[in-house]
Amino acid sequence: MKIFMTGATGFIGGATARLLTGQGHQLTCLVRDRSKASGLEDLGCSLVDGDLSSRPRLAEQMAGHDALLHNAALYEVGIPKDRIPVLRKANVEGTVNTLEAALEAEIPKVLYVSTCAVFGSTHQNVATEEYRRPDLDNPDGLNFTSVYEETKYEAHQIAKNLIKTRNLPCVIVQPAGVYGPDDHSELGATMNQFLDGKLPMVPFPDFGTGLTYVDDIAAGFALALDKGEVGESYILNEGNYTMRQALEAVGELAGRKVPKRNMPTPLLKALRPIGPLVGKIMDQPPNLAELISSADGVTFWADGAKARTELGWHPRDLKTGLRLTLEAEGRLPEAA
């Protein structure tokens, strides 16, 4: 299959490109910076220069392909105000341009990469694909935990609307939290702080997230491209964990004890006015207020049963994935 892909230079995108080319697919990857795409060239991917700002150019570039895999997005939480337009342009406007370009180019199949974050905080419930946000009935509007969640929610609705009103031949996948070697997310940063002995207290110990090894997310994408039903969504999530549970799983493999004390959230809230300074000290983003709103008492829990049953998706368990991650990063004790 000849696939046009966006977001191939990212964490998930790189794993997906490796898998798809290994399966014999021909990949054309849209890239903004070729200096970040040497790995894609080594895989035999064709590179085209550009971004998501021009629908006509995108349509021209993807014409003749069998499928579009739209994975490009900015995942940032705790952002300063000047980053809000950047996320909106990438996640919302970029999705509109890319999916409408697919319609113009008459691409036979589209895979749009959404996220479980569109469900908002599940308040310790476990969402399925049919989950309905409780705040949809809120007369004051939706209560988003972050700008990232808001922009991805809007993009998700755009994809669903194009499927319904313009027959976009689109399948939607919704990864939950992702981990693996060289993960630079906030979760990855917290795990690295713990492994480096720089985490005296556990921040947001009850924050809940799904966790799936990055290569298994890529496998879910490939299966959705092959077997996914147009108009359907598929959650990709191996299991749901709290922050403390995730760190304990890492600590068990790495031979490190998780701090018993939790970081007092009221103290973090009191430090919000000096968020940028605190962020530098804690190796966290500068907008402490958004970081708190996206983690304090929040769970992004979801059920990947549909993908397992209908796509034949079989992600590895957390311990196996973490072992592979620590081994690749040289953090696994020899005796482990």
Image: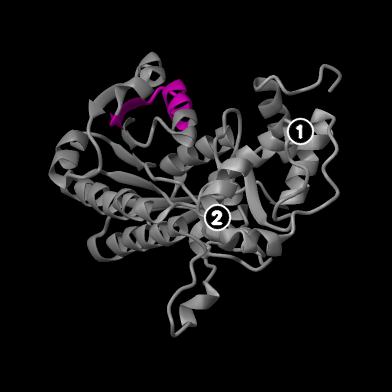
Across and down, in percent, residue 154 comes to 37, 62
Residue beneath disc 1: 197
Are the residues at dot 2 and dot 1 in contact (C-beta closer than 8 Å)? no
Residue beneath disc 2: 274
Q: Nearer the viewer, residue 289 or 53?
A: 289
Label 2 element class:
helix
The amino acid beneath tag 1 is Gly
Q: Nearer the viewer, residue 1 or 93?
A: 93
Across and down, in percent, residue 163 comes to 31, 60
Label 1 element class:
loop
Q: Quadrant of residue 206?
A: bottom right
Across and down, in percent, residue 178 comes to 58, 42
Q: Identify whether 211 is placed above or below 222.
A: below
The amino acid beneath tag 2 is Ile
Return the mark for residue 101. none
Q: Residue, x 19% and y 40% (percent of image)?
A: 58
Disc 2 and disc 1: Cα gap in Å? Answer: 24 Å
Label 2, residues with CA under 10 Å away: few <14, some 14-19, many ≥20? few
Residue 302 on the magenta span: no
Q: Quadrant of residue 323?
A: top right
Give the side of residue 286 with respect to residue 151, left or right.
right
Q: Nearer the viewer, residue 126 or 220?
A: 126
Q: Quadrant of residue 267?
A: bottom right
Q: Identify whether 74 is placed above or below 196.
A: below
**What segment is highlighted magenta in the picture?**
16-32
The answer to whether one can see residue 313 in this image is: no
